[in-house]
Amino acid sequence: MLWSFRRCPYAMRARLALASAGQPVTLREVVLREKPAAFLAASPSATVPCLETDEGGIDESLDIMLWALDRGDPEGWRDIPRDGFDLIARCDGPFKASLDRYKYATRHPESDPLAERAQGAAFLGELDARLAGRAWLFGGSARLADMAILPFVRQFAHVDPAWFESQPWPDLLNWLTAFKASDRFRQIMPKYPRWQDGDAPVRFP
C-alpha cells in the first residue's frame, strides 16, 4: 500500500518508478493538513510517500523507487553510472534545501530567497550542460536519475515560471517540457480522492 500526496515531488517520483516497473499497489491519497491515524501509524516520519510491504514499511522515496525497480525494470532505469546517484544526492541535499528556502521564503526568514534561487540555479545550469545535445541525462531514454530529479525541477520552475523560462537553459527546458508532456507523467497525476477509513481500494498504476 502506498500513502501518497499528488503534488509532492517525493511521492511523484515513487509513483513514477512503480509505474515504470509495472508494480501494482493500493494507493491512499493523504491530505497533509489532516493526516489520518492509519498513515501516522505506518510512517515513522509522518511524511509521504510511505510504502507498506509484506517485508515492512519503506519511508524514503528513493528507497521506494529502488524497491520497485528491483522487482521489474523493463525500461532500464537502473542502468546509470555512479555519478547518476551523485546527482540524485545533490538534488535531495543542497538543491532541495535551496528550493525550500526559495519557495517557502516566509518559513525561512533567516534566508535570502533570491540567493537561494541563485544557488539552485547553479545546479540547474550544470544539468543543462549535461543535457546538451541529448534528451535525457544518461542516453537516449529516461533513467532513474532523470525521474528522481525532474519532480523537483518542476517544483522549482513553478515558483516563478516567467523567470524560470527566461533562463539560458534550453536543454533543461526541453527536458522538463518533455517530462510534463509524457504519457508517464499523465499516468501518475490523476486526481485521487482523499482516503478515508472504509473507502474502496484504489489501484495504482
Image (tube, helix red, strand yellow):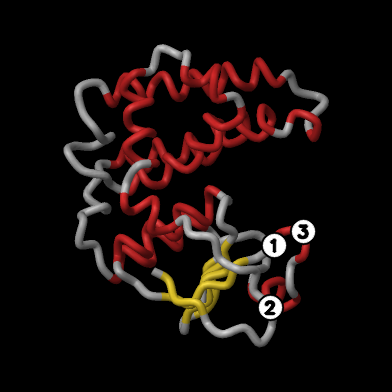
Disc assigned to residue 196: 2
**Type of the residue with mark 1:** Val
**Type of the residue with mark 2:** Gln
* Residue 62 position in % (x across, y down): 45, 55
In which quadrant is the C terminus drawn? bottom left
**Type of the residue with mark 3:** Arg
**130 to 136, vertically: above or below:** above
- Quarter occupied by residue 19: bottom left
Identify the residue position indicated by label 3 in the image.
33
Task: Pick the residue in front: 94 or 28.
Answer: 28
Look at 45% across and 63% down and name the residue there.
64
Q: Secondary structure at mark 1?
A: loop
Disc assigned to residue 31: 1
* Residue 103 position in % (x across, y down): 67, 31
Q: Secondary structure at mark 2?
A: loop
* Residue 150 position in % (x across, y down): 42, 40
Q: Are marks 1 and 3 in contact (CB under 8 Å)?
A: yes
Badge 2 density bin: few <14, some 14–19, many ≥20, Cα 10 Å: few
Look at 56% across and 85% down and name the residue there.
200
Look at 31% across and 52% down and name the residue there.
183
